[in-house]
Amino acid sequence: MFATWNFDWEKVRLGSRRITIIYSDDDPFVPKKHAVKLQNLLKAKSIMMPGQKHFSVSTFPKYTKFPELLKLI
C-alpha cells in the first residue's frame, strides 16, 4: 500500500503541474482515508465520485470507458 512507501512527496508534487485524486466512497480496495491522505501529501485537488467502487471493469462493468477522466486530462 502506498501509505507505507517512502516517496519524496514534495518532489512528486513539484514535478507535476496539476494533481487530481479521483476516488469513490465505496471502493472495496482503497479506503477513502487513503485517498484523503494522498490528497494531503500531494496538496492535490480531489474529486469524490459516489458509488463507483474501484473504477475497474471487475467491480463496475461501466468502466470500459471513463469519460470523466478524459475531461481532466
Image (cartoon, rainbow, N blue to C red):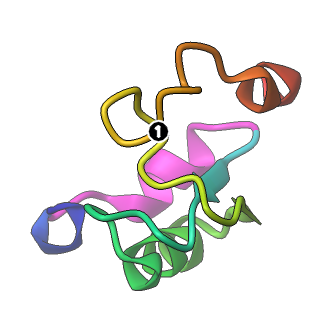
Q: Where is residue 39 drawn, in percent x and y?
A: 57, 70
In this rendering, would 27 be left or right of 62?
Answer: left
Specify the farthest residue to the front.
Answer: 61
Quadrant holding the N terminus:
bottom left
The residue indicated by pointer 1 is 60
Is 67 in the magenta? Answer: no
Quadrant holding the C terminus:
top right
- The magenta region covers 6-17
Q: Nearer the viewer, residue 22 or 63?
A: 63
Q: Nearer the viewer, residue 68 or 41?
A: 68
In the image, what residue occupies the spot 41% across and 49% down?
54
Image quadrant in which you'd find residue 7? bottom left
Residue 60 vertical position relative to residue 43 in the rendered view, above or below: above
Residue 15 vertical position relative to residue 19 in the rendered view, above or below: above
Q: Where is residue 43 drawn, in percent x and y?
A: 65, 70
How many numbered marks appear?
A: 1
Residue 52 vertical position relative to residue 45 in the rendered view, above or below: above
Q: Where is residue 47 drawn, in percent x and y?
A: 75, 60
Specify the farthest residue to the right.
Answer: 71
Element carrying mark 1 = loop
Disc 1 marks which amino acid?
Answer: Phe
Residue 14 vertical position relative to residue 44 in the rendered view, above or below: above
Image quadrant in which you'd find residue 42? bottom right
In the image, what residue occupies the spot 15% across and 64% down?
6
Q: Nearer the viewer, residue 19 or 14?
A: 19
Q: Nearer the viewer, residue 36 or 61?
A: 61
Is 14 in the magenta? Answer: yes
Circle 1 residues within 10 Å: few <14, some 14–19, many ≥20: few
Specify the farthest residue to the top.
Answer: 64
In this rendering, would 30 be left or right of 60?
Answer: left
Specify the farthest residue to the bottom.
Answer: 33
In the image, what residue occupies the spot 49% across and 40% down?
55
